[in-house]
Amino acid sequence: MSDNRLLEQIDRYVNGQMSGEELANFEQLRKDNPAIDSQVSEHRNFLGALKHYSERLDLESRLNAIHEEIDVHTLQDELMEKPSWIVSLWRHHHSKISVAASIAIFAVLITLMFTGGFKKHDTAYVELKKEIASVRVSTLLLNEQSHKIKKQISSSSNGNKIVNPGKFSGTGFALTANGYLVTNYHVVKDADSVYVQNVNGDAYHAKVIYTEPAQDIAFLQINDASFKSLGSVPYNFKRAKSDLGEEVFTVGYPADVIAFSEGALTSPAGFNGDSSAYELSILARPGNSGGPLLDNKGNLIGIISGKQTSYEGISFAKKSSYLLKAIQNIPSDSLAKPLNLNTRNTLAGLSRPQQIKKLRNYVFMVKVYN
Amino acid sequence: MSNRSNSSIPTDNEVILGILNNSDVVLKRLYLAYFPMVLQLIINNNGSADDAKDIYQEAIIVLYNKVKSGNFELSSKLKTYIYSVSRRLWLKRLTQMNRYGGDLKDFEEHLPVEEADHEQHADRDLQFGKMQAALSQLGEPCKTIMEDFYIHNRSMQEICERFGYTNADNAKTQKYKCLQRLKKLFFQQN
């Protein structure tokens, strides 16, 4: 009971509720009794703690009331780690970005189409992989390294005997009976001298009279003393485009002996949509370059010029209309003899072996030395 | 008070005056102004929205106590102060929970919190916890009498009526009995 009495006194003292004589007495007591003095300061601390406690409770309840009004969930979504500006940019503007990207890709494709960028730099456009994956291939020129060619010494009596096999070879075919030939520009490019060898193994010296590198066409003229007329060319040159699905064939010199290969016209456009060429389902081999492409009736419709490396059995041929245009471009002073194209077709109606039997005399192996 | 000023960010001086005057309006504006900042800090550093609420309220309490104690000098922007205190508190909490990965993702500039300030707050926090524990151990009716008298600031007269004491002396005796026990429980925890 006296504890409570003392506590009451201390409590009243600390709270400043004492006055007059009582206050004076208590202060005297405090001074005289250190135990009471320490109790007073302890009580003061305690009341301070109690006051803080109640203040804090009060403040917390006020803060909680305010907190109730905040839509924490929405805020949280907004503030949650914005992944990066680029992701948020995408989230907010992906439709616009998509449209812009489509336009950009389209523009790039169009630009490449017109500048021929596909041909030269197609592997550099990695970004377009998917879009142009199907065209990301390169053509393989069909001229053949000469070291693969086994020299076959001609047993024929007329014509030159070629000892040196030449560095490159391709195929060429006659335009006229008087010795004008056509082949691919890439066959005779950088040539020092050119020989053509017929099916019997007779070789003649030839010179390049005109080239159109853009069309990959080169014209040769046999200028060899031993050369006699070929006789009238059995095929004629088709001006119009040929149709898809048409059966076509070629003969050429992928090896030292003449070889036949056939297929169909599979697309009116060549590599990378090149409209000056046909796509063919012909198995062309190195050495076929420059060979004639004929249809069933024996019309000459193109010049074999390349193949696709990524797919087997797809090759390309320059359209005959481009050949005819190139012929017109030959400067007249390059022509020592008249170049009159044959218009009569003597192959039509013949069976394929008969056609080839006639045709092979007009198809030459083109050997290039440089 | 217009809606605009209700929701706008209060100036630093407004906040300090508001705290000194116990202004509810300023407290609310203060709270709303900086909560998103602290929420962002916490939820992007391994915390939940509830953690953010705890830490933010604790930071405001630190500010409150500091301003009320009269020795508050704002050496930086209030925003930076609140962010720094919250950051310090969250670091401490993360360390206690063993969730501190050694790196906090920061969203605002911040200053080191003075150790003395932090210790003072930790000390108050400890006292608060002790008082809470002491009160919870105190049985009825003492608990209610103590809370009524010291927390809800009810007069002895009201308390007499609530508990049906026939005279104020009885109530007073009861109050001091309870106070004695509460003190004992409080200091026992040391």
Image (cartoon, grey):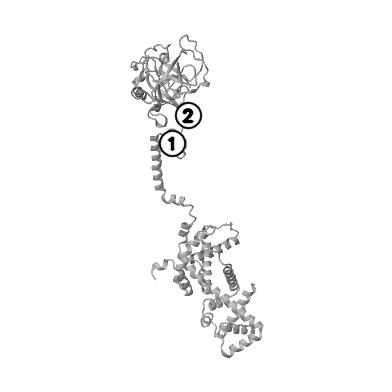
B68 up-or-down from A171: above or below: below
> Residue B129: percent from the left, percent from the top?
59, 70
A211 versus A79 height, above or below: above
**Letter of the chain that mark 2 sits on in the rendering:** A
Quarter of the image that includes the N terminus of chain A: bottom right
Callout 1, which amino acid? Ile
Measured as percent of width and height from the top left, residue A147 is found at 53, 21
Q: Earlier in the sequence, mark 1 or mark 2?
A: 1
Of all residues, the one furthest to the bottom in this rendering is A21
Check residue A309 in the rendering and tell me which mark sits there, or answer none.
2
Residue at which label 1 appears: A132
Question: As shown in the figure, which amino acid type bears the numbered disc 2?
Answer: Thr
Please report the residue visible at 39 percent of the width from the left and 37 percent of the height from the top.
A111
- Which is nearer the eye, A300 or A341? A341
Instruction: Return the chain for callout 1.
Output: A
Q: The residue tagged with tag 2: helix, strand or loop?
A: loop
* Residue A2 left/right relative to A293: right
